[in-house]
Amino acid sequence: MSQLTLNLAEGSVAFDCTESDARALQAALHELMGRLKALAAKPAGAGGGRPAPLPSLDYKHPGDLRVEVFCNPNIWPTPYAAKVLLTLKSDRMRLSTETDLSRMLEDLGQYLDQY
């Protein structure tokens, strides 16, 4: 197990992460990105009205350090503008911050390149 470093708007956070945990998070984020891209590709007014709301991403990974990622895709105009709420929790601390979805995907990709 090695350290996954996620770059934030101001600083970064690093924590122990297994390859399988990183791949599960990456898959959830890629699925979200795909939904956002599909929504952005639809022409305005297509289908005769408002588009159906997309489900939020609410990823939770239990463990000594619980990792939670939340994103409401319905509030972002493009996939590359989307931000996620990242929360890291343990018995002794809690860190919550907002970070770019695309930046988090890049960081996960760089981490997984070592495997």
Image: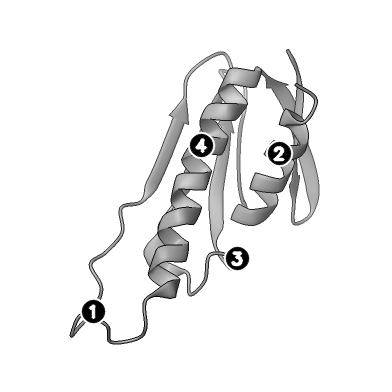
Residue at position x 45%, y 46% in the image:
31
Mark 2 or 3, nearer chain start: 3
Mark found first going from the N terminus, 3 or 1? 1
Q: What's under tag 2, amino acid-wise? A: Gly
Judging depth in this view, the residue of 62 and 24 nearest the camera is 24
Q: Secondary structure at mark 4?
A: helix
Amino acid under label 4? Answer: Ala
Task: Name the residue: 35% across, 86% down.
Answer: 44
Location of mark 3 (residue)? 80
Residue 79 placement (x, y as % from top left): 53, 64
Q: Quadrant of the N terminus?
A: top right
In the visual, does 37 lie left or right of 19?
A: left
Provide the residue designation for mark 4: 27
Kind of residue at badge 1: Arg
Check contact, mark 2 vs mark 3: CB within 8 A. Answer: no
Q: How is the image coloured?
A: one colour
| Distance between mark 3 and mark 1 Cα atoms | 21 Å
Q: Amino acid at mark 3?
A: Tyr
Mark positioned earlier in the residue sequence (4 or 1): 4
Q: Quadrant of the rendered structure where residue 49 is?
A: bottom left
Q: For residue 25, which quarter of the picture?
A: top right
Crowd class of label 2 (few under 14; some 14 to 19; many from 20; radius 10 Å): some
Q: CA distance from mark 1 to mark 2?
A: 34 Å
Q: Which of disc 4 and disc 3 is earlier in sequence? A: 4
